[in-house]
Image (cartoon, rainbow, N blue to C red):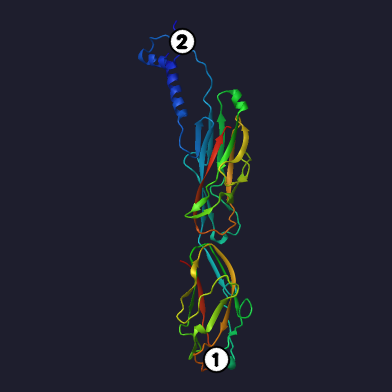
Amino acid sequence: MQRITLAAVIFLALLVYPGTVLAEITFTFKGAPAEVRIRVGAVSGVTTVVHAVPLSLSGDGTPISGAPAGVAIEVSTRRETSREMNQAYYIVTADSSVPLSSGLDTIPFTKISWTSQDGDIPAGRFDGTSAQVIRDLTRARWSISDRLTFIYDNDQAVPAGTYTGTVTYTIWIP
Amino acid sequence: MKKNAKMMVMGLVLVMVFCYAGPVLAETSIHGDTASVELNFQVTIANYIEFRVGTAGVTTNTINFSPTAAELGANTTIPGTGGDAGGSQVTVSLLSNTPQITITATNDTPTGLENGIDRIDWLSISTTDVLGNLAPPLLNNAGGEASPDTPLAGPQNITTTWEYEYTRRVGDPIPSIPGNYVGTVTYTATSL
């Protein structure tokens, strides 16, 4: 009996002569491809966290929480083998190096901190760098699911305007 | 065999789905060792100007000048009384986050301080910035003088003291009728 190991050939043969070709196929199952996954905010689109500073509190040091509160963050990985799942680690970083801006005026991301619902992503503050580690070495087998609420310090007088900026979160396996 | 063929087709479709690497969005799943997503931030800061001359609140201070006949005759410069900062001085503060701020002085008696019959030119009252933090506008009959010459860039948080003095200017007539000559100056901080 002819042994054919090329799956594509078998597949085409089956399409042409269904039921008339006999073949044996030997599969060596290695597992699904390695994958990393990260989500921050809504499942689709890019979520915007808005800090609206009331006129009466502008610059007086009253912390201003962002809306929405409790922004979801989920991180997970999949390795090709169980051994890799046990041995590999991942890191989550945040790039906040480009400050929020309104025209030529800027607010550094160091003025924004966050609280954590359950500590998977520890509470912290953006440091304004391109690769701030917000979740250190974590075993690949473990998934992270947390909710973060962001807070603007509101402790300085800044020119009026709508300041916008973007933080990029990255999961990577060293 | 047909069943196996269907499974293979499904497998190929799944592989194609997993191989797709989308743009950086709120959720990313990518084959390999790294993936990124974005989160936007927005901070909205409203315009504000908080400006004070004299006592805080709704109180309007009155600076009183009481020159003697000799001082009038000699064109002597004299301070007043009644300022919230003592004597002829008033507290001035400006807190703002708007750009291009100027202070403008207008008055309600465009021919000078009046007693109903006679008048004293507003130019007889000078204003000095004691601490040198915010130049005051010139007082004159027409009003509308602005200061500083170069508008202030925002944000500003200025506190200073202005002092008023009265001098009968050389050439001005001595007020012929004794009495109280009054007028009110309104200062306005404006973002151009």
Task: Give above or below for A30 relative to A3.
Answer: below
* Residue on which disc 1 sits: B179
* Quarter residue B164 falls in: bottom right
Which chain is mark 1 on? B
Residue A16, given in percent of the width and then of the height, sits at: 35, 14
Q: Which mark is residue A144?
A: none
Estimate how packed mark 1 is, as few (under 14), some (14 to 19) or many (20 or more) residues with alpha carbons within 10 Å. few
Quarter in which the C terminus of chain B is drawn: bottom left
Question: Do discs 1 and 2 belong to a common subunit?
Answer: no
Question: Does the image show residue B62?
Answer: no
Rendered view: B39 above or below B163: above
Q: Which mark is residue A24?
A: 2
Looking at this rendering, what residue extends furthest in the top direction? A1
Residue closer to the observer: A99 or A162: A99
- For badge 1, the amino acid type reads Gly
SS at badge 2: loop
| Residue closer to the observer: A174 or B60 | A174
Q: Amino acid at mark 2?
A: Glu
The residue closer to the viewer here, B123 or B31, is B123
